[in-house]
Amino acid sequence: MVADKIKYLREEKKITQAELAKILGITRSSVNAWEMGISVPSTQYIVELANIFRVSTDFLLGIDNNATISTEGLSDEDIKLVYGIIEHLKRKNDTV
């Protein structure tokens, strides 16, 4: 559900509803309404939210539950390390 994703991502980024609203140029009550499921963001705001939280619009909309990680600005070596950590965690979780 979009409402749950917005709240989760906002809290993960450790920003308040008011801070997110300011970034988007809207009211805090609009963000609150999204998170409560009273209303849904327009397409424009879905795209902006995806950019702010560095996730795909599909993830935000609940179409694809695979979160993405932006590797922009990382070296090839850094990217290999990130993939190595992900694979390690997957193997670890498979044994639990």
Image (cartoon, helix red, strand yellow):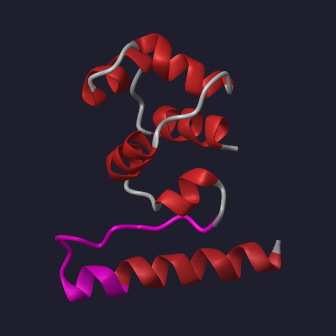
Q: Residue 60 in the image: x percent, y percent?
A: 55, 52
For the stretch drawn in magenta, the main secondary structure is loop
Range shown magenta: 65-80
Q: Is residue 24 above or below residue 93?
A: above
User: Residue at 46% of width from left, 84% of height from top?
Assistant: 84
User: Residue at 82% of width from left, 71% of height from top?
Assistant: 96
User: Residue at 53% of width from left, 77% of height from top?
Assistant: 86
Q: Residue 81 in the image: x percent, y percent?
A: 36, 82
- Of 79 and 61, nearer the camera is 61
User: Quadrant of the rendered structure where residue 44 is?
Assistant: top left
Counting the numbered discs, the total is 0
Question: Where does the N terminus fall, quadrant-wise?
Answer: top right
Q: Is residue 46 above or below residue 74?
A: above
Does the segment drawn in magenta span residue 69? yes
- Residue projecting furthest to the right: 96
Does the segment drawn in magenta span residue 66? yes
Q: Residue 63 in the image: x percent, y percent?
A: 66, 63
Q: Is residue 60 left or right of residue 4?
A: left
- Of 24 and 9, nearer the camera is 24
- Of 89 and 14, nearer the camera is 14
